[in-house]
């Protein structure tokens, strides 16, 4: 695009290029036009982040990149062209972390495994290049442990192979790292909620909100300083309309639950807290398929209860239990 702009070319009409593009990109100091290489500009920008990676050690992004790096492990083969100290191969952490005293004595901290390990006649020999010989008890203990670990390691006969530790087959996958990142970022909400593929997303979404008390019941609105003239339940008119009352203890709702208990032949439904609504199907015997059916019925009932409650609030419709039951069966 830059080249075509320079020479006035268009997709419909090409123009002759009188100077090679490389010469055009060449810096003015070198006699070129100074357009610059996007590849080199990108490399320079990446190098800036490498510098910041080295210097901004306390930054969150740096911790994330480092955490991802630790998810790689190498299985050295006959080449052994990986870092002896800095790559993760012998233990679950690099040797520079496992044996910090020995690493401080290493004269070539970027040494490859091939420079430190040889296998003459099938035996494993560890070569060293210390700035001084280990002499303290701690250093000698680390050295003994290192020798024992290296000599017991089974080097492969093929090429060096990098492995992704989040997958059993060692292959990298975007899904595995997404799950790992999510496990680090998010914590379990403790809702016992399962998304049911047999019910629409909007129904699942409503139930997910209900078990967290995140639906606009009258009491929820009042807690958010919304002026509500009457806080009584729109189904029964007896008590304040909280989510727990509306979906669990309301006498109208209880009639719906009793109907479902007899219709599905399941255990009596008791809702002591909102998250119980997402676990009713789990507490009944039967196959997973049957439990999924029960869960679908429970979700449908909650959807219908909420819909009829909204009809009463916004359209001033009278509550009719038989109509609610019939609506649930038709759904």
Image: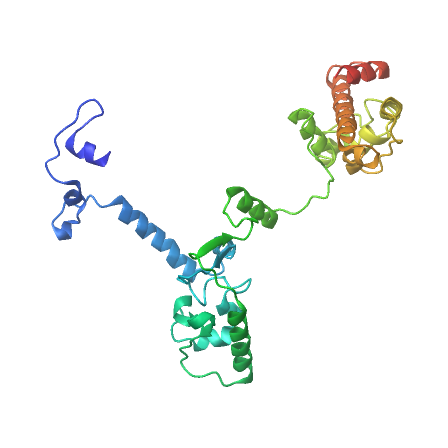
Q: Quadrant of the C terminus?
A: top right
Residue at image position (12%, 31%) is 16
Q: Position of residue 183 (x, y in %)?
A: 61, 48
Residue at image position (52%, 66%) is 153
Residue 112 visible from this viewpoint: no
**Above or below, comparing residue 261 to residue 92 in the picture:** above
Residue at the extreme front of the image, as rendered: 121
Q: Position of residue 102 (x, y in %)?
A: 48, 76
**Above or below, comparing residue 115 to residue 219 in the picture:** below
Residue 193 visible from this viewpoint: yes
Where, by quadrant of the figure, is residue 196 drawn? top right
**Above or below, comparing residue 10 to residue 50 in the picture:** above
- Going by the image, does 76 lie left or right of 37? right
Q: Quadrant of the N terminus?
A: top left
Residue at the extreme left of the image, as rendered: 18
Residue at image position (68%, 32%) is 195
Q: Position of residue 242 (x, y in %)?
A: 79, 32
Residue closest to the eye, 293 or 316: 293
Q: Position of residue 37 (x, y in %)?
A: 24, 45
Query: How many discs mark residues in the rendered view?
Result: 0
Residue closest to the eye, 125 or 56: 125
């Amino acid at each position: 695009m830059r080249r075509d702009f320079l020479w006035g070319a268009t997709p419909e009409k090409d123009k002759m290029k009188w100077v090679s593009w490389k010469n055009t990109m060449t810096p003015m100091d070198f006699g070129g036009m100074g357009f610059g290489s996007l590849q080199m500009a990108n490399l320079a920008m990446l190098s800036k982040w490498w510098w910041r990676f080295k210097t901004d050690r306390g930054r969150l992004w740096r911790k994330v990149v480092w955490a991802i790096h630790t998810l790689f492990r190498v299985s050295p083969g006959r080449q052994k062209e990986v870092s002896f100290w800095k790559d993760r191969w012998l233990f679950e952490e690099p040797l520079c972390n496992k044996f910090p005293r020995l690493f401080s004595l290493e004269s070539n901290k970027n040494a490859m495994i091939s420079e430190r390990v040889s296998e003459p006649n099938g035996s494993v020999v560890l070569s060293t290049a210390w700035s001084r010989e280990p002499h303290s008890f701690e250093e000698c203990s680390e050295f003994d442990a290192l020798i024992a670990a290296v000599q017991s390691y089974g080097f492969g006969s093929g090429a060096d192979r990098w492995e992704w530790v989040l997958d059993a087959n060692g292959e990298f996958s975007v899904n595995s790292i997404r799950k790992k990142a999510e496990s680090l970022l998010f914590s379990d909400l403790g809702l016992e909620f399962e998304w049911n593929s047999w019910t629409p997303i909007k129904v699942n979404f409503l139930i997910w909100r209900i078990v967290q008390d995140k639906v606009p019941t009258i009491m929820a609105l009042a807690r958010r300083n919304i002026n509500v003239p009457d806080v009584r339940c729109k189904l029964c008119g007896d008590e304040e309309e909280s989510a727990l009352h509306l979906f669990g203890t309301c006498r109208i709702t209880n009639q719906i639950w009793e109907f479902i208990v007899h219709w599905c032949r399941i255990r009596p439904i008791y809702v002591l807290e909102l998250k119980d609504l997402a676990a009713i199907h789990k507490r009944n015997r039967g196959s997973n398929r049957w439990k999924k059916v029960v869960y679908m019925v429970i979700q449908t009932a909650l959807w219908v209860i909420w819909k009829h409650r909204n009809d009463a609030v916004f359209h001033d419709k009278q509550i009719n239990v038989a109509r609610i039951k019939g609506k649930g069966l038709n759904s």
